[in-house]
Amino acid sequence: MGVIERVEARTILDSRGDRTVEAEVYTREGFGRASAPSGASTGSNEVTPFRNGSAEESVEAVREKVESELVGVNAGHQDLVDTALQDVGGNGFGDVGGNGAVAVSLATAKAAASERGLPLFEYLGGLYAKRVPFPLGNVVGGGSHAGAGTDIQEFLVAAEEADSARGAVLANAEVHRLTGRRLEQLGGLAGGRGDEGAWISTLDAPDILEVIRDVCDEVEARLDVRLGMGLDFAASELYDGSDYVYSDGKRDKGAQMEYVESLCDDFDLIYVEDPLEEEDFEGFAELSSRVDATVCGDDLFVTNAGRIELGVELDAADAVLIKPNQVGTLTGTWMAVETAQDNGYGIVVSHRSGETSDAYLSHVATALGSPFIKCGIVGGERVSKLNELLRIEEMI
Ligand code: 2PG
Ligand code: MG
Protein backbone atom coordinates (compact mmCIF):
# COMPACT_ATOMS: atom_id res chain seq x y z
CA MET A 1 0.00 0.00 0.00
CA GLY A 2 1.18 3.49 -0.82
CA VAL A 3 3.83 2.44 -3.30
CA ILE A 4 4.57 5.03 -5.98
CA GLU A 5 3.43 3.73 -9.36
CA ARG A 6 3.92 6.75 -11.57
CA VAL A 7 5.41 10.27 -11.50
CA GLU A 8 4.47 12.89 -14.04
CA ALA A 9 5.64 16.43 -14.59
CA ARG A 10 4.81 19.35 -16.82
CA THR A 11 5.51 23.05 -17.00
CA ILE A 12 2.77 25.42 -15.94
CA LEU A 13 2.68 29.19 -15.50
CA ASP A 14 3.29 31.00 -12.26
CA SER A 15 1.74 34.32 -11.23
CA ARG A 16 4.37 36.30 -13.18
CA GLY A 17 3.63 34.30 -16.32
CA ASP A 18 6.93 32.45 -16.01
CA ARG A 19 7.15 28.73 -16.43
CA THR A 20 7.54 26.48 -13.41
CA VAL A 21 7.23 22.78 -12.64
CA GLU A 22 4.09 20.92 -11.63
CA ALA A 23 4.46 17.28 -10.59
CA GLU A 24 2.01 14.44 -10.00
CA VAL A 25 2.59 11.34 -7.94
CA TYR A 26 0.30 8.32 -8.28
CA THR A 27 0.01 5.45 -5.84
CA ARG A 28 -2.56 2.66 -6.04
CA GLU A 29 -5.14 4.58 -4.07
CA GLY A 30 -3.56 7.98 -3.74
CA PHE A 31 -2.76 10.96 -5.85
CA GLY A 32 -0.86 14.17 -5.23
CA ARG A 33 -0.24 17.19 -7.43
CA ALA A 34 2.02 20.07 -6.44
CA SER A 35 3.77 22.96 -8.13
CA ALA A 36 6.81 25.04 -7.29
CA PRO A 37 6.97 28.80 -6.77
CA SER A 38 9.90 31.03 -7.82
CA GLY A 39 11.61 33.97 -6.16
CA ALA A 40 12.74 37.28 -7.64
CA SER A 41 14.92 38.30 -4.72
CA THR A 42 16.66 34.97 -4.34
CA GLY A 43 19.45 34.25 -1.88
CA SER A 44 22.70 33.19 -3.53
CA ASN A 45 22.83 30.13 -1.25
CA GLU A 46 19.47 28.75 -2.35
CA VAL A 47 19.48 25.52 -4.35
CA THR A 48 19.48 25.97 -8.14
CA PRO A 49 15.81 26.44 -9.10
CA PHE A 50 15.89 24.86 -12.56
CA ARG A 51 18.26 22.60 -14.48
CA ASN A 52 20.19 24.95 -16.76
CA GLY A 53 17.73 27.70 -15.86
CA SER A 54 14.95 25.92 -17.74
CA ALA A 55 11.65 24.66 -16.34
CA GLU A 56 11.37 22.35 -19.39
CA GLU A 57 14.73 20.76 -18.65
CA SER A 58 13.69 20.23 -15.04
CA VAL A 59 10.53 18.50 -16.23
CA GLU A 60 12.64 16.30 -18.50
CA ALA A 61 14.88 15.44 -15.56
CA VAL A 62 11.86 14.42 -13.48
CA ARG A 63 10.62 12.22 -16.33
CA GLU A 64 13.96 10.72 -17.28
CA LYS A 65 15.84 10.46 -14.01
CA VAL A 66 13.52 10.88 -11.04
CA GLU A 67 10.55 8.68 -11.91
CA SER A 68 12.62 5.50 -12.29
CA GLU A 69 14.15 6.08 -8.84
CA LEU A 70 10.80 6.64 -7.14
CA VAL A 71 8.61 3.95 -8.66
CA GLY A 72 8.32 1.19 -6.06
CA VAL A 73 9.16 3.45 -3.11
CA ASN A 74 6.47 3.87 -0.47
CA ALA A 75 5.10 7.42 -0.69
CA GLY A 76 4.87 7.44 3.10
CA HIS A 77 8.66 7.23 3.30
CA GLN A 78 9.20 10.90 2.62
CA ASP A 79 12.83 10.66 3.73
CA LEU A 80 13.60 7.95 1.16
CA VAL A 81 11.88 9.90 -1.59
CA ASP A 82 13.73 13.07 -0.68
CA THR A 83 17.07 11.27 -0.43
CA ALA A 84 16.50 9.86 -3.92
CA LEU A 85 15.64 13.35 -5.17
CA GLN A 86 18.81 14.66 -3.57
CA ASP A 87 20.92 11.89 -5.13
CA VAL A 88 19.53 12.50 -8.59
CA GLY A 89 19.56 16.28 -8.20
CA GLY A 90 23.22 16.32 -7.27
CA ASN A 91 25.13 19.20 -5.80
CA GLY A 92 22.75 22.12 -5.20
CA PHE A 93 20.03 20.21 -7.10
CA GLY A 94 21.48 21.45 -10.40
CA ASP A 95 20.65 18.21 -12.26
CA VAL A 96 16.92 18.41 -11.54
CA GLY A 97 16.37 21.89 -10.22
CA GLY A 98 15.14 22.62 -6.71
CA ASN A 99 11.78 23.57 -8.17
CA GLY A 100 11.44 20.20 -9.90
CA ALA A 101 12.48 18.47 -6.68
CA VAL A 102 10.17 20.42 -4.41
CA ALA A 103 7.18 19.79 -6.70
CA VAL A 104 7.82 16.02 -6.58
CA SER A 105 8.54 16.08 -2.84
CA LEU A 106 5.25 17.86 -2.05
CA ALA A 107 3.25 15.82 -4.57
CA THR A 108 4.54 12.69 -2.80
CA ALA A 109 3.36 13.96 0.59
CA LYS A 110 -0.03 14.79 -0.89
CA ALA A 111 -0.30 11.32 -2.45
CA ALA A 112 0.57 9.69 0.89
CA ALA A 113 -1.99 11.89 2.67
CA SER A 114 -4.66 10.98 0.14
CA GLU A 115 -3.87 7.24 0.53
CA ARG A 116 -4.67 7.65 4.20
CA GLY A 117 -7.70 9.86 3.62
CA LEU A 118 -6.13 12.68 5.63
CA PRO A 119 -5.79 16.38 4.88
CA LEU A 120 -2.13 17.26 4.23
CA PHE A 121 -1.72 19.29 7.43
CA GLU A 122 -2.88 16.36 9.55
CA TYR A 123 -0.79 13.80 7.68
CA LEU A 124 2.33 15.95 8.16
CA GLY A 125 1.61 17.41 11.60
CA GLY A 126 -0.34 14.64 13.29
CA LEU A 127 -2.85 15.05 16.05
CA TYR A 128 -1.06 18.03 17.49
CA ALA A 129 -1.33 20.31 14.49
CA LYS A 130 -3.96 22.39 16.20
CA ARG A 131 -3.19 26.01 15.53
CA VAL A 132 -3.68 27.70 12.20
CA PRO A 133 -1.01 30.34 11.53
CA PHE A 134 -1.94 33.98 11.20
CA PRO A 135 -1.04 35.66 7.91
CA LEU A 136 1.82 38.12 7.62
CA GLY A 137 0.89 40.04 4.50
CA ASN A 138 2.48 42.75 2.42
CA VAL A 139 0.40 45.87 2.14
CA VAL A 140 2.90 48.02 0.23
CA GLY A 141 5.84 46.73 -1.78
CA GLY A 142 8.72 47.70 -4.00
CA GLY A 143 12.28 46.52 -4.56
CA SER A 144 12.58 43.66 -7.04
CA HIS A 145 8.84 42.97 -6.75
CA ALA A 146 7.78 46.18 -8.50
CA GLY A 147 9.09 48.30 -11.33
CA ALA A 148 8.71 51.42 -9.19
CA GLY A 149 8.09 52.45 -5.61
CA THR A 150 10.07 51.94 -2.45
CA ASP A 151 13.57 50.53 -2.16
CA ILE A 152 12.31 48.43 0.75
CA GLN A 153 10.70 45.30 -0.68
CA GLU A 154 7.81 44.70 1.72
CA PHE A 155 5.73 46.66 4.23
CA LEU A 156 3.99 43.94 6.20
CA VAL A 157 1.14 43.63 8.63
CA ALA A 158 0.00 40.76 10.85
CA ALA A 159 -2.49 40.19 13.61
CA GLU A 160 -0.60 39.53 16.83
CA GLU A 161 -3.90 38.76 18.47
CA ALA A 162 -7.18 37.73 16.88
CA ASP A 163 -9.96 35.41 17.93
CA SER A 164 -9.31 33.20 14.90
CA ALA A 165 -7.26 32.86 11.73
CA ARG A 166 -10.40 34.00 9.91
CA GLY A 167 -10.39 37.22 11.93
CA ALA A 168 -6.69 37.70 11.18
CA VAL A 169 -7.17 37.11 7.43
CA LEU A 170 -10.09 39.54 7.23
CA ALA A 171 -8.21 42.20 9.19
CA ASN A 172 -5.28 42.06 6.77
CA ALA A 173 -7.62 42.42 3.79
CA GLU A 174 -9.17 45.46 5.42
CA VAL A 175 -5.76 47.02 6.09
CA HIS A 176 -4.80 46.46 2.45
CA ARG A 177 -8.02 48.00 1.14
CA LEU A 178 -7.91 51.06 3.40
CA THR A 179 -4.19 51.64 2.82
CA GLY A 180 -4.78 51.75 -0.94
CA ARG A 181 -7.56 54.27 -0.44
CA ARG A 182 -5.48 56.42 1.91
CA LEU A 183 -2.46 56.39 -0.37
CA GLU A 184 -4.63 57.44 -3.27
CA GLN A 185 -6.08 60.34 -1.27
CA LEU A 186 -2.54 61.44 -0.45
CA GLY A 187 -1.45 61.18 -4.10
CA GLY A 188 1.01 58.53 -2.98
CA LEU A 189 -0.08 55.65 -5.19
CA ALA A 190 2.24 54.88 -8.10
CA GLY A 191 -0.50 52.88 -9.80
CA GLY A 192 -0.77 49.13 -10.08
CA ARG A 193 0.45 46.54 -7.66
CA GLY A 194 3.64 44.57 -7.29
CA ASP A 195 4.27 40.87 -7.85
CA GLU A 196 2.65 39.95 -4.56
CA GLY A 197 -0.38 42.22 -4.82
CA ALA A 198 1.03 44.95 -2.56
CA TRP A 199 0.40 48.61 -3.42
CA ILE A 200 3.24 50.49 -5.08
CA SER A 201 3.75 53.87 -3.44
CA THR A 202 5.66 57.02 -4.28
CA LEU A 203 5.89 58.04 -0.61
CA ASP A 204 9.00 57.41 1.45
CA ALA A 205 9.21 54.63 4.01
CA PRO A 206 8.33 56.61 7.19
CA ASP A 207 5.29 58.19 5.49
CA ILE A 208 4.08 54.80 4.30
CA LEU A 209 4.51 53.32 7.77
CA GLU A 210 2.54 56.22 9.19
CA VAL A 211 -0.33 55.57 6.77
CA ILE A 212 -0.35 51.86 7.59
CA ARG A 213 -0.18 52.56 11.32
CA ASP A 214 -3.22 54.85 11.13
CA VAL A 215 -5.09 52.28 9.11
CA CYS A 216 -4.17 49.57 11.62
CA ASP A 217 -5.51 51.74 14.46
CA GLU A 218 -8.78 52.14 12.58
CA VAL A 219 -9.08 48.42 11.83
CA GLU A 220 -8.22 47.50 15.43
CA ALA A 221 -10.99 49.80 16.66
CA ARG A 222 -13.51 48.10 14.39
CA LEU A 223 -12.43 44.45 14.45
CA ASP A 224 -11.36 42.42 17.42
CA VAL A 225 -7.64 42.24 16.57
CA ARG A 226 -4.28 43.62 17.60
CA LEU A 227 -2.08 44.38 14.62
CA GLY A 228 1.64 44.84 14.23
CA MET A 229 3.78 46.07 11.35
CA GLY A 230 6.96 44.71 9.83
CA LEU A 231 9.41 45.21 6.96
CA ASP A 232 11.34 42.96 4.61
CA PHE A 233 14.34 44.96 3.43
CA ALA A 234 15.59 42.15 1.16
CA ALA A 235 18.88 43.96 1.80
CA SER A 236 21.03 41.75 -0.44
CA GLU A 237 19.16 43.29 -3.36
CA LEU A 238 20.25 46.76 -2.20
CA TYR A 239 23.85 45.78 -1.47
CA ASP A 240 26.53 46.64 -4.02
CA GLY A 241 29.37 44.88 -2.23
CA SER A 242 30.16 47.68 0.17
CA ASP A 243 27.09 49.88 0.61
CA TYR A 244 23.31 49.70 0.57
CA VAL A 245 22.12 51.64 -2.47
CA TYR A 246 18.83 53.55 -2.08
CA SER A 247 17.25 55.92 -4.61
CA ASP A 248 18.19 58.84 -2.35
CA GLY A 249 21.79 57.77 -1.85
CA LYS A 250 24.01 55.11 -0.35
CA ARG A 251 24.12 53.91 3.24
CA ASP A 252 27.15 52.13 4.61
CA LYS A 253 26.62 49.26 7.04
CA GLY A 254 26.51 51.56 10.08
CA ALA A 255 23.99 53.89 8.45
CA GLN A 256 21.88 50.96 7.31
CA MET A 257 21.76 49.62 10.86
CA GLU A 258 20.80 53.03 12.21
CA TYR A 259 18.09 53.38 9.57
CA VAL A 260 16.62 49.95 10.39
CA GLU A 261 16.82 50.70 14.11
CA SER A 262 15.11 54.07 13.75
CA LEU A 263 12.20 52.61 11.74
CA CYS A 264 11.85 49.77 14.26
CA ASP A 265 11.78 52.22 17.18
CA ASP A 266 9.64 54.95 15.61
CA PHE A 267 6.95 52.57 14.43
CA ASP A 268 7.13 49.79 17.06
CA LEU A 269 7.81 47.26 14.36
CA ILE A 270 7.25 43.69 15.46
CA TYR A 271 9.18 42.08 12.58
CA VAL A 272 12.14 42.90 10.38
CA GLU A 273 13.41 40.52 7.67
CA ASP A 274 16.80 40.60 5.94
CA PRO A 275 17.81 44.04 7.22
CA LEU A 276 21.40 43.36 6.11
CA GLU A 277 23.02 41.47 3.26
CA GLU A 278 23.03 37.69 3.24
CA GLU A 279 26.58 37.04 4.49
CA ASP A 280 26.62 39.55 7.34
CA PHE A 281 25.91 37.21 10.26
CA GLU A 282 27.79 39.52 12.64
CA GLY A 283 25.78 42.55 11.54
CA PHE A 284 22.57 40.59 12.03
CA ALA A 285 23.72 39.66 15.54
CA GLU A 286 24.44 43.26 16.44
CA LEU A 287 21.16 44.51 15.02
CA SER A 288 19.16 41.78 16.78
CA SER A 289 20.55 42.97 20.08
CA ARG A 290 19.64 46.57 19.28
CA VAL A 291 15.99 46.23 18.21
CA ASP A 292 12.89 44.81 19.91
CA ALA A 293 11.44 43.57 16.62
CA THR A 294 11.82 39.90 15.72
CA VAL A 295 14.79 39.78 13.33
CA CYS A 296 14.16 37.11 10.70
CA GLY A 297 16.67 35.69 8.21
CA ASP A 298 15.53 34.80 4.71
CA ASP A 299 18.46 35.07 2.26
CA LEU A 300 20.67 34.75 5.37
CA PHE A 301 19.49 31.20 6.16
CA VAL A 302 17.87 30.02 2.87
CA THR A 303 15.99 27.30 4.82
CA ASN A 304 19.32 25.52 5.25
CA ALA A 305 19.97 23.72 8.56
CA GLY A 306 23.73 24.32 8.31
CA ARG A 307 23.36 28.07 7.89
CA ILE A 308 20.80 28.17 10.71
CA GLU A 309 23.34 26.40 12.97
CA LEU A 310 25.90 29.03 12.10
CA GLY A 311 23.34 31.75 12.86
CA VAL A 312 22.57 30.17 16.22
CA GLU A 313 26.28 30.03 17.11
CA LEU A 314 26.64 33.71 16.35
CA ASP A 315 23.27 34.64 17.85
CA ALA A 316 22.45 36.27 14.54
CA ALA A 317 18.64 36.43 14.55
CA ASP A 318 15.40 35.52 16.29
CA ALA A 319 13.56 33.70 13.52
CA VAL A 320 14.02 31.85 10.25
CA LEU A 321 11.98 32.31 7.10
CA ILE A 322 11.01 28.89 5.77
CA LYS A 323 10.63 28.46 2.01
CA PRO A 324 10.58 24.82 0.87
CA ASN A 325 11.91 25.58 -2.62
CA GLN A 326 15.00 27.27 -1.19
CA VAL A 327 16.18 23.86 0.01
CA GLY A 328 14.42 21.57 -2.52
CA THR A 329 12.60 19.00 -0.37
CA LEU A 330 10.12 18.64 2.43
CA THR A 331 12.71 16.73 4.47
CA GLY A 332 15.22 19.57 4.05
CA THR A 333 12.50 21.99 5.13
CA TRP A 334 11.75 19.84 8.16
CA MET A 335 15.43 19.72 9.14
CA ALA A 336 15.67 23.51 8.92
CA VAL A 337 12.59 23.92 11.11
CA GLU A 338 13.86 21.41 13.65
CA THR A 339 17.23 23.15 13.86
CA ALA A 340 15.52 26.50 14.34
CA GLN A 341 13.04 25.31 16.95
CA ASP A 342 15.56 23.21 18.90
CA ASN A 343 17.58 26.37 19.32
CA GLY A 344 14.73 28.62 20.37
CA TYR A 345 14.38 30.37 17.03
CA GLY A 346 10.94 31.19 15.69
CA ILE A 347 9.83 30.22 12.18
CA VAL A 348 7.74 31.96 9.53
CA VAL A 349 6.66 29.78 6.61
CA SER A 350 6.65 31.85 3.42
CA HIS A 351 5.47 32.04 -0.18
CA ARG A 352 7.61 33.30 -3.07
CA SER A 353 6.96 36.32 -5.23
CA GLY A 354 6.15 34.06 -8.20
CA GLU A 355 3.44 31.69 -6.97
CA THR A 356 0.89 29.23 -8.29
CA SER A 357 -2.57 28.68 -6.84
CA ASP A 358 -1.32 25.55 -5.04
CA ALA A 359 -2.22 25.90 -1.37
CA TYR A 360 0.07 23.29 0.22
CA LEU A 361 1.94 26.07 2.01
CA SER A 362 -1.00 26.61 4.37
CA HIS A 363 -0.95 22.92 5.29
CA VAL A 364 2.81 22.86 5.73
CA ALA A 365 2.71 25.98 7.92
CA THR A 366 -0.04 24.50 10.10
CA ALA A 367 1.76 21.15 10.36
CA LEU A 368 5.00 22.83 11.39
CA GLY A 369 3.31 24.96 14.05
CA SER A 370 4.43 28.15 12.38
CA PRO A 371 2.80 31.07 14.22
CA PHE A 372 2.77 33.13 11.03
CA ILE A 373 2.55 32.42 7.32
CA LYS A 374 3.84 35.04 4.90
CA CYS A 375 1.58 34.68 1.88
CA GLY A 376 0.37 38.07 0.74
CA ILE A 377 -3.09 39.57 1.07
CA VAL A 378 -4.68 39.81 -2.38
CA GLY A 379 -4.36 38.16 -5.79
CA GLY A 380 -5.62 34.67 -6.69
CA GLU A 381 -2.35 32.88 -5.99
CA ARG A 382 -2.11 34.54 -2.53
CA VAL A 383 -5.81 34.24 -1.67
CA SER A 384 -5.70 30.50 -2.46
CA LYS A 385 -3.44 30.09 0.60
CA LEU A 386 -5.51 32.41 2.79
CA ASN A 387 -8.76 30.69 1.87
CA GLU A 388 -7.14 27.33 2.62
CA LEU A 389 -6.30 28.60 6.12
CA LEU A 390 -9.99 29.29 6.65
CA ARG A 391 -10.85 25.74 5.58
CA ILE A 392 -8.13 24.20 7.76
CA GLU A 393 -9.39 26.19 10.73
CA GLU A 394 -12.85 24.69 10.24
CA MET A 395 -11.36 21.20 10.07
CA ILE A 396 -9.39 21.71 13.26
C1 2PG B 1 11.00 37.34 0.18
C2 2PG B 1 10.21 36.68 -0.92
C3 2PG B 1 8.75 36.50 -0.64
P1 2PG B 1 11.09 36.31 -3.31
O1 2PG B 1 11.99 38.02 -0.08
O2 2PG B 1 10.70 37.12 1.34
O3 2PG B 1 8.09 37.66 -0.27
O4 2PG B 1 10.45 37.24 -2.17
O5 2PG B 1 10.19 35.15 -3.50
O6 2PG B 1 11.17 37.19 -4.52
O7 2PG B 1 12.43 35.88 -2.82
MG1 MG C 1 12.52 38.05 2.15
Image: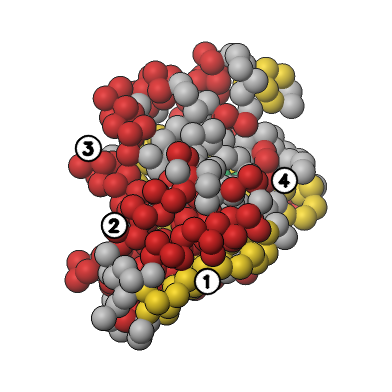
The answer to whether the residue labelled 4 contacts the one labelled 2, judged by CB atoms less than 8 Å apart, is no
Does the CB distance between marks 4 and 3 fall below 8 Å?
A: no
The residue tagged 4 is 146
Q: Earlier in the sequence, mark 4 or mark 2?
A: 2
Q: Earlier in the sequence, mark 4 or mark 3?
A: 4
Q: Nearer the viewer, mark 2 or mark 1?
A: 1
Real-space Cα separation, disc 4 to disc 3, in angstroms: 36 Å
* Nearest to the observer: residue 40 or residue 102: 102
**Local crowd size for mark 1, using a 10 Å CA cut-off: few (<14), some (14–19), many (≥20):** some
- The secondary structure type at the circle numbered 4 is loop
Q: Position of residue 62 (x, y in %)?
A: 52, 61
What whole-number distance in Å separates the C-alpha atoms at marks 1 and 4? 34 Å
**Could you classify mark 2 by the number of other residues whose Cα lies within 10 Å: few (under 14), some (14-19), or many (20 or more)?**
some
Nearest to the eye among marks 4 and 2: give it.
2
In this rendering, position of residue 322 left or right of residue 34: left
Residue drawn where x is 65% and y is 66% of the image: 12
